Image (tube, rainbow, N blue to C red):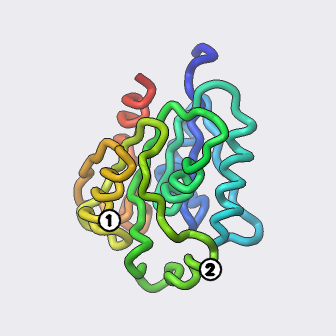
Amino acid sequence: MNDQTPTIVIVPGLRDHVAEHWQTLLAARLPKVRTVPPLEKDKLSLAARVEALEETLAGVDGPVILVAHSGGVLIVAHWAKSPRRPIQGALLATPPDFDTPLPAGYPTQEALRDNGWFPVPRTRLPFPSIVAASTNDPLGSIDRVEALARDWDSRFVNIGAVGHLNPASGFGDWPQADDFIAALCR
């Protein structure tokens, strides 16, 4: 491995770290990886989450590939409005559609609005990206996620009926993430 091998920066969603989540398993097997740490307070604050991403990135030398899931995708999109460093690429898996009310047990639109999540960025991202979307994600319809990918100028990939691509949907390891990361490394 040389100094130009990208560091993978994991950006978890609003539920932060889950032991059997594909991001956690991915981080455990990668040689150059950093994970945005969970917040101790202001857990729903977008500003605090963007700052946590910025602090994590500040500790990384060399190229970076972001690997975000769910709300982490929207953290990346908000951060990318005024990035402080170049990013080689981003894997953006199953972003939620915050413009549509989420299922019970997730934050309300009012709580999201009060914590700075709106408007959801719809401008071109300043780095190559892949948006991976599920055909049966309860947090975002594939059509709405495909529209986000178009707005962000991201490569859109339909990954099939994988729910929200999390343990609750029956997913732990997600080997396809390695393929997407390899594509972003090229």
- Residue topped by disc 2: 114
Residue at x-position 56% and y-position 36%: 8
- State the residue in front, 15 or 156: 156
Tell me which numbered mark, 2 or 1, is placed earlier along the sequence.
Answer: 2
| The disc label shown at residue 113, or none | none
Residue at x-position 57% and y-position 67%: 15
> Residue 14: x, y in percent?
57, 66
Whether the residues at callouts 2 and 1 have beta carbons within 8 Å, the answer is: no
Residue at x-position 29% and y-position 58%: 147
- Left or right: where 19 falls relative to 37: left
Dot 1: element: loop
Q: In the displayed image of the protein, which residue is found farthest to the top? A: 2
Q: How many marks?
A: 2
Badge 1 crowding class, 10 Å Cα cut-off, few under 14, some 14 to 19, many 20 or more, is: many
Of the 4 image quadrants, the one containing the N terminus is top right
Badge 2 crowding class, 10 Å Cα cut-off, few under 14, some 14 to 19, many 20 or more, is: few
- Residue topped by disc 1: 163
Q: Is residue 109 above or below residue 173?
A: below
Dot 2: element: helix
> Residue 83: x, y in percent?
61, 43
Tell me the quarter of the picture where residue 177 sits. top left
- Left or right: where 126 falls relative to 33: left
- State the residue in front, 90 or 124: 124
Q: Amino acid at mark 1?
A: Gly
Q: Amino acid at mark 2?
A: Asp
Query: What is the distance, in whole Å, between disc 2 and disc 1 at their CAs?
Result: 27 Å
> Residue 157: x, y in percent?
27, 47
Of the 4 image quadrants, the one containing the C terminus is top left
> Residue 99: x, y in percent?
41, 74
Q: Is residue 21 above or below residue 144?
A: above
Tell me the quarter of the picture where residue 4 sits. top right
Residue at x-position 63% and y-position 65%: 46
